[in-house]
Every structure is written in structure tokens, then in C-alpha cells.
Amino acid sequence: MELLKRFYGINGKSGHEAQIKEFFVEQLAGLELSVEEEAFGNIFITKGVADSYPCVTAHLDEVHSPTERNIVVDGDMIYAVNGCGERVGIGADDKNGLWIIVRLLHSKPVLKVALFVQEERDGEMPGCRGSRACSLAFFDDVRYILAVDRKVNNEVVTVGKGNIRLCDNDFIPNDLLQKYSYMCVDGGRTDVVALKERGLHVPCCNISCGYYNAHKPEEYSVFTHLENSLAFVSDIIDRV
């Protein structure tokens, strides 16, 4: 939980992701990885050598403007307050995804990771700017992409905004869905939707990772739900 709290303490509003990038890469010290930062600012990571890779993605930015954050742990719930005791956002969308990916990079021998900048809308600027600007060549040898960028704790988005089909509903084995209490749903727009719109053909989905009240000062996470998401994604990687 301490690593997650440190993630929450860093602000990475869209277009200002340098500090969160630096902190993320610091957590990979000692691992044998290829880490590449694209001209637009996205980070692509490869671990291990394989003919085909599982791939996991999250975004580095958040919607909240910089402010004082005092992280509060209340049982299983994590949130933040400012110096006046008022609730402020923690950027769990999508630092929960970043936390999961750090854990996976430490545990999986073979993995690809795509970390996108500027996924969130910023004023009049549209979202998913990093995923719309990136080279698709990084994904030539991936079997699928699992985004960990979905609110709540039990959803796998298989159809994105605009009726974009991300994967078939049977892409994830039903026994895994039942084991971790997930279900397939239609969802909104995120980086894997943008990649699909650009013609990426591999299966993708967006998986809940235990945060609530996204984009609001009352944002919070439930740590056991986040741990369940990590276990679910880990099992998918081992099985699919």
C-alpha cells in the first residue's frame, strides 16, 4: 500500500507527466527491461524475449490540478484531503493501473507495457492524444492488450464508446470472470478504443481496477478491490 500512496502523492495532470514518469521508472530499478520514450512522450517497455507478448496498458496523466494532498487510509479505503481537511482527488484514474503494472513487471518474465500520456480530456483538448499519436509498430508482436483503466471493481469493457468492438465476450475464460467476480460490459472511451479506431487488430479490453468517483474530489480506492484486479490480470496473462 505504501507504493500506492506514493503514487497518489504525485500530480500528473495531462501534459505535465514528467514527475510521474520518473517515479514509475524508478520502481523498475534492477529489472532487465527495454524502456523507450517516444517523441510524443509515451513510454513503451519490453521485458523478456518471446515470439508474442501479452501487453498491459495504463495512462500516466490525471484530471486533477496540483494541490496539497494528505493521503488518508481508512480501513480498506484510500482517499486524500488538503490542509483544510477538504476532500481532493488522488488520481487513482489511472495510478491504480500504474501500480498494477509495476507489480506485473516485477513478477512476469515476459511482458510488454504501453504507458500513454494525455489520455484525459483537458479543457477543449480531446482525450487519448498519446494513443492517437503513437507508432503502432510496438504492438506487432503482441497477442492482446489489457488496459487497467476502468472504474469500480467488476467490469471488463469489451465494447467501447462509438460501439467499437474491442474483443469477443469469450476472450477472457468464463471461469476467470467468475473466480474474480467480473462481467463483460459496454464502456466509454480510453486508449485501447483509440488504438482500435486506428486499425489495431489484436483483442483489447479495459478492466476495472478498484477506484470510485473518478474525476471528482471525492475520488477514492478500495485496496482489496485493487488487489483483486491485480490477481485477475495476472491470471489472464498466465492463461491467455
Image (tube, helix red, strand yellow):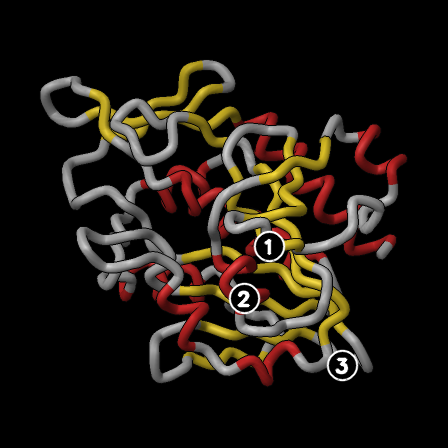
| Residue 219 vertical placement versus 113 (above, below) | above
Point out residue 141 in the picture as x, y percentages from the top left corner. Answer: 73, 80
Q: Residue furthest front?
A: 163
Look at 65% across and 29% down and name the residue there: 154
> Which of the two labelled residues, at mark 3 and mark 1, occupies the earlier sequence position?
3
Residue that numbered label 1 is attached to: 164
Measured in 3D between alpha carbons, the distance from the residue under mark 2 to the one under mark 1, in whole angstroms, is 7 Å
Is the residue marked by circle 2 packed among few (<14), some (14-19), or many (20+) residues within 10 Å? Answer: some
**Residue 25 can be seen, yes or no:** yes
Residue that numbered label 3 is attached to: 49
| Residue 230 vertical placement versus 31 (above, below) | above
Q: Residue furthest top?
A: 75
Q: Quadrant of the C terminus?
A: bottom right
Look at 82% across and 82% down and name the residue there: 51
Point out residue 32 in the picture as x, y percentages from the top left corner. Answer: 62, 76
Point out residue 78 in the picture as x, y percentages from the top left corner. Answer: 41, 25
Secondary structure found at label 2: helix
> Which of the two labelled residues, at mark 2 and mark 3, occupies the earlier sequence position?
3
Measured in 3D between alpha carbons, the distance from the residue under mark 2 to the one under mark 3, in whole angstroms, is 29 Å
Is the residue marked by circle 1 packed among few (<14), some (14-19), or many (20+) residues within 10 Å? Answer: some
Q: Amino acid at mark 3?
A: Val
